[in-house]
Image (cartoon, rainbow, N blue to C red):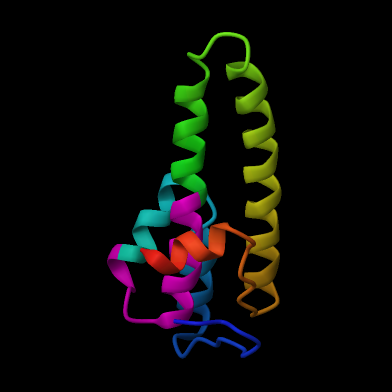
Amino acid sequence: MSNDGKTLESDGGARARVLAFISYLGILCLVPLIINRDDEYVAFHARQGLVLWMWGVLAIFGLSLPVVGQFFFSVSAMAIMIFSIIGMVSVALSKAWKFPFIGEWAEAL
């Protein structure tokens, strides 16, 4: 799926928007992937949420690194929170904004 300038919309109504919204709430990104993978709109947001969640898991493991671990975790946690909020806003506006870098990895899933 490519989101190059075209608007991605859902056919699933409120249920699809709720599933897309929870895609940005950590491990809950797995719920839309399992329940409603056929909806391109939901799958788009769920894949981006999955990449954010995997980044968060890596950041937690990064805490074990001496010196740079705490810095990497702090920067990652802030970036993940910002991307999650942007994702939730895009769902609230019925849009599908592809995040830089993260969107590319999400498409590969």
Q: Is residue 3 above or below residue 11?
A: above
- Residue 43 counted in the magenta span: yes
**Residue at 42 percent of width and 46 percent of height:** 27
Expressed as whole percent of the image width and height from the top left, the position of residue 1 reads: 44, 81
Q: Quadrant of residue 85?
A: bottom right
Q: Residue furthest left?
A: 34
Q: Quadrant of residue 8?
A: bottom right
**Residue at 44 percent of width and 85 percent of height:** 12
Q: Residue furthest top?
A: 66
Q: Nearer the viewer, residue 13 or 74?
A: 74
The total of numbered circles placed on residues is 0
Expressed as whole percent of the image width and height from the top left, the position of residue 109 reads: 36, 63
- Residue 85 counted in the magenta span: no
**Residue at 46 percent of width and 63 percent of height:** 106
Expressed as whole percent of the image width and height from the top left, the position of residue 36 reads: 34, 73
Expressed as whole percent of the image width and height from the top left, the position of residue 79 reads: 68, 43
Relative side of 11 to 77, left or right: left
**Residue at 46 percent of width and 33 percent of height:** 58
Q: Is residue 91 above or below residue 67?
A: below
Provide the major secondary structure of the magenta segment.
helix
Relative side of 104 to 98, left or right: left
Q: Quadrant of residue 97?
A: bottom right
- Numbered range of the magenta stretch: 34-51
